[in-house]
Amino acid sequence: MLDAQTREIVQQSGGLTIDFIDENHRRGYMLKLGKPGADCSSGGCSGCG
């Protein structure tokens, strides 16, 4: 559950993506503001629609 201020930030940014990373020496949750795939201008990365 998000507080009102955090909810407003997430809504203004276009959403929140939460991924779980488990690679080599990296393990944990990664949170990213914005629409999923919004940083994929070429369409060549996974997760882009």
Image (cartoon, grey):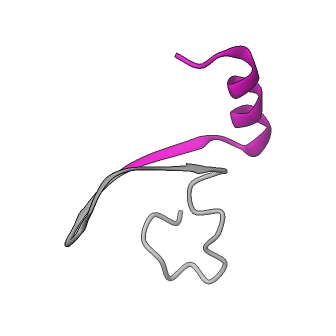
Foreground pick, 38 / 22: 22
Q: Position of residue 23 (x, y in %)?
A: 23, 68
Q: Position of residue 31 (x, y in %)?
A: 50, 48
Looking at this view, name the residue that lies furthest to the left: 24
Q: Is residue 42 left or right of residue 48?
A: right
Q: Is residue 8 left or right of residue 32?
A: right
Q: Is residue 11 above or below residue 46?
A: above
Q: Position of residue 37 (x, y in %)?
A: 57, 63
Residue in the image at 59% along x and 19% along y = 2
Q: Position of residue 11 (x, y in %)?
A: 73, 33
Looking at this view, name the residue that lies furthest to the front: 25
Q: Is residue 45 left or right of residue 27?
A: right
Foreground pick, 4 / 41: 4
Q: Quadrant of residue 39?
A: bottom right
Residue in the image at 52% along x and 66% along y = 48
Q: Is residue 38 above or below residue 2?
A: below
Q: Is residue 2 magenta?
A: yes
Residue in the image at 45% along x and 63% along y = 47
Q: Quadrant of residue 40?
A: bottom right
Foreground pick, 48 / 1: 1
Q: Which residues are magenta?
A: 1-19
Numbered disc total: 0
